[in-house]
Amino acid sequence: MPENPLATLQAIDPLVIRHLHDSDSLVFDSGAVPKKLKLLIAMAFDAAHGAENGVRALAAAALREGATAQEIAEVLRVAFHLTGAGCLYTASAGLKGIVGPA
């Protein structure tokens, strides 16, 4: 498992990290929009912003919530259409070993 990317900030400002984690339920809990869809949207944002580890973590969480590889692929099509091919490279690297060939 990779090191927590926020470990350094956690050491110097645990209050902000606690705030970040506390807000996760506000953002990702199911409501009018199911949790799975929220995770897929967040994954698309991370792909668009070049956050490979974010793609990996969010895709894995979406799969645990019942997302399929096809749903992941279709959400990434939207990200590609709106932000360009760079997100596909990020997504492919982030998804390695999670969905599709290893």
Image (cartoon, helix red, strand yellow):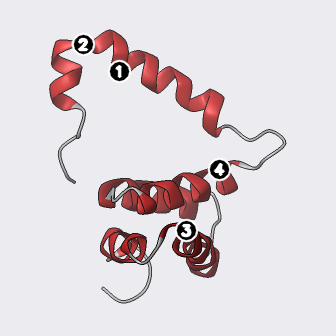
Sequence-wise first label, 4 or 1:
1
Label 3, label 2: how many angstroms apart (C-alpha)? 33 Å
* Direction from residue 43 to residue 14 in the image, left or right: left
Dot 4 falls on a residue whose secondary structure is: helix
Label 4, label 1: how many angstroms apart (C-alpha)? 21 Å
Label 1, label 2: how many angstroms apart (C-alpha)? 7 Å
Instruction: Report the residue at 78% width, 47% height from top.
Output: 33
Dot 3 falls on a residue whose secondary structure is: helix
Sequence-wise first label, 1 or 3:
1
Sequence-wise first label, 2 or 4:
2
The percent position of residue 22, horizontal first and vertical second, equals: 51, 21
Label 4, label 3: how many angstroms apart (C-alpha)? 14 Å
- Closer mark to the observer between disc 4 and disc 3: 3
Question: In the rendered image, which residue does mark 1 sit on?
Answer: 17
Sequence-wise first label, 4 or 3:
4
Residue type marked 1: Ile
Q: Is residue 34 above or below residue 101?
A: above
Question: In the rendered image, which residue does mark 4 sit on?
Answer: 38
Density class for disc 2 (Cα within 10 Å; few <14, some 14-19, many ≥20) is: few
- Closer mark to the observer between disc 1 and disc 3: 3
